[in-house]
Amino acid sequence: MPHFTLTPIAMILLLAACQPVPDPGRPGGNSLARCGGDPVGALIGQPVSAMPATGGWMALRVIEPGMAVTEDYSPSRLNVALDQQGRIVGVACG
């Protein structure tokens, strides 16, 4: 029966290992340089059309209001959040 008591413990440890590690370079967040978002971070408040067509990001996800998004974490992906008018309101790696 000991294998049944170890299974929940092993599952908890595996789930804890899946959590992203915060970047010490930016309190409460992660560095935009890691996913190539530095140029886009300066565009907060601008229309999405002001964003460069290409950049240093490996993957790009533009999030419109009310849009369903997955909660998976990808440190090389740049997430750009828009408001109702199509202006950039947030930029983050993940």
Image: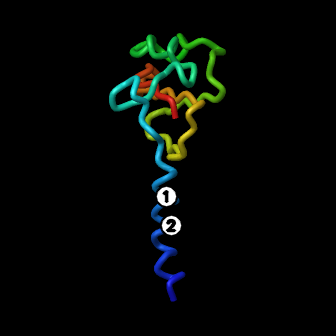
| Horizontal and vertical percent position of residue 35 | 56, 24
Question: As rendered, which of 17 and 51 lies closer to the eye?
Answer: 17
| Horizontal and vertical percent position of residue 54 | 66, 15
The answer to whether the residues at label 1 and label 2 have Cβ atoms under 8 Å apart is yes
Please give the count of numbered marks on the rendered protein.
2
Q: Which residue is mark 1?
A: 15
| Horizontal and vertical percent position of residue 71 | 50, 46
Name the residue at the bottom extreme. 1
Name the residue at the front extreme. 2
Name the residue at the left extreme. 27
- Residue at 57 percent of width and 38 percent of height: 74
Amino acid type of disc 2?
Answer: Met
Above or below — where is 31 with respect to 67? above
Q: For this view, does 60 lie left or right of residue 44?
A: right
Q: Coloured how?
A: rainbow
Say the numbered circle drawn on residue 28: none
Amino acid type of disc 1?
Answer: Leu
| Horizontal and vertical percent position of residue 49 | 55, 14
- Residue at 41 percent of width and 27 percent of height: 83
**Circle 1 SS class:** helix
- Residue at 40 percent of width and 23 percent of height: 25
Dot 1: within a 10 Å radius of its alpha carbon, few (fewer than 14), some, or many (20 or more) residues? few
Q: For this view, does 64 lie left or right of residue 24?
A: right
Task: Give the quadrant of residue 91.
Answer: top left
- Residue at 49 percent of width and 21 percent of height: 32
**Circle 2 SS class:** helix
Q: Which residue is mark 2?
A: 11
Above or below — where is 77 with respect to 13? above
| Residue at mark 1 to residue at mark 2: CA–CA distance | 6 Å
Question: As rendered, which of 50 and 23 lies closer to the eye?
Answer: 23
Above or below — where is 53 with respect to 90? above
Dot 2: within a 10 Å radius of its alpha carbon, few (fewer than 14), some, or many (20 or more) residues? few
